[in-house]
Image (spheres, grey):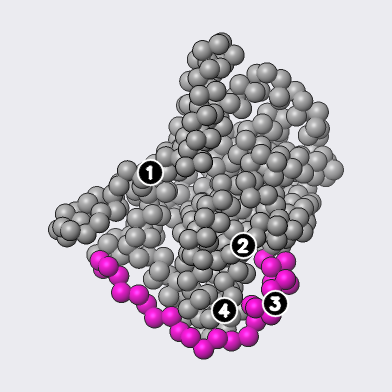
Amino acid sequence: MRTTIVGLALLAVGVLLVATGVLLPADVARLAARVGPVLAFVVGMTVVTDLAARAGLFDAVAARVARWGRGSTLALWGLVVVAGAVSTAFLSLDTTAVLLTPVVVVLARHVDVAPLPFALTTVWLANAGSLWLPTSNLTNLLALHAFGDPSPLAFARLTWAPALVATVVPMLVLLALFRRALTGRHGHEQRPPQPRDPVLLRTAGVTVTLLVPALVSGVDVWVPAVVAAAVLAVAFALRERGAPGKPGALRWNLVPWPTLVLVSGLFVVFEAAHGAGLGAWLARVAGDGEGTADLVRVAATGMLGANLVDNLPAYLALEPVTDSPARLVALLVGVNAGPLVTPWASLATLLWHDRLTRLGVSVRWGGYMALGLLVAPLTVLLATLTLAATL
């Protein structure tokens, strides 16, 4: 509800800016042409992941992962790390924060280990691990237009080294902090849950399996996401038609309206802010050049902005001062790997905390921020230094 209210307020400000001539209709049309595919991808992936979860796909994966752990808590956590990294890279950070978090918490409880380090694993991977591919984060999708070759593989060639560091460093810190909870053995074994509808489970499995390579095929990512969403929606509609009396999965709230409204409002407001001189001021703060110190400065500015306001508006505000692929990747390091301190630094973090609250897992924001102050600057610095070394 709060997200919707803030988004509507931002949209109202945008309408006022257009009505008063501060923002021209041509600017809004150009912005819509750029943002439209990004929002289509968000809708498609949200529908896919939500319906796949309802079909029991993620529960089945969690059960399989538990068996692969063979009683070792460390091995089990390592498999969760791999699952979180892959989920974030291919299916976006929101998928990891929203859907993988309940899976790993239930998994941790079932094998009688502390859920907190597993929960922190998902939120840190969701943010810091979102540098691999354009699909990993909205900021990456927005940045594609600035690359000479906007294909996913070209993006990965520039980001793979800092992405690897940004994924590994938080996990090493987590392992050091929770080494007692993450070592040893457990005596429980997760049995595969019985799917509500085996046909839907198989359909979801095949759809997601085909979707992953399609997202890195070079086709605009919103196309396979929307197609996959349509396939699952049709499958659910057909199966639910034959099972009257059960609550249907195809409801209006399947589309992430609050997120769409908020993101749209942020885009419009920051487009106007740049016209009012925000870009010139930020250019002085972020500096210029592509030396190591220059890239660290850009990344640090992005990290600070993300934790002050949110990573998406921070990216939008700073994008015009990144006049080269190297500076753009440094900015992505800051706004993707840096939002680990404040709760509002990333929408994924807020969604993650909401899921934990519903599951009865208590996370104090003071403790979360203290850990973030340790891991975020370290991760951003090492990832940026790696970027500078591999250019």
Res. 113 mark:
4
Q: Quadrant of the rendered structure where residue 81 is? A: bottom right
Is 190 part of what is drawn in magenta?
A: yes
User: What element does badge 1 sit on?
Assistant: loop
Q: Quadrant of the rendered structure where residue 382 is? A: bottom right
> Where is residue 182 shown, x and y percent of the image?
64, 77
Q: Are discs 4 and 3 less than 8 Å apart at CB?
A: no
Q: CA distance from mark 3 to mark 1?
A: 39 Å
Q: Write down the residue under mark 2.
A: 363
Asked whether residue 227 is in view, the answer is no
> Which is nearer the N-term, disc 3 or disc 1?
3
Nearest the viewer among 197 and 35 is 197
Asked whether residue 58 is in view, the answer is yes
Amino acid carrying label 1: it is Val
> Which is nearer the N-term, disc 4 or disc 2?
4
Label 1 or label 2, whichever lies nearer to me, is 2
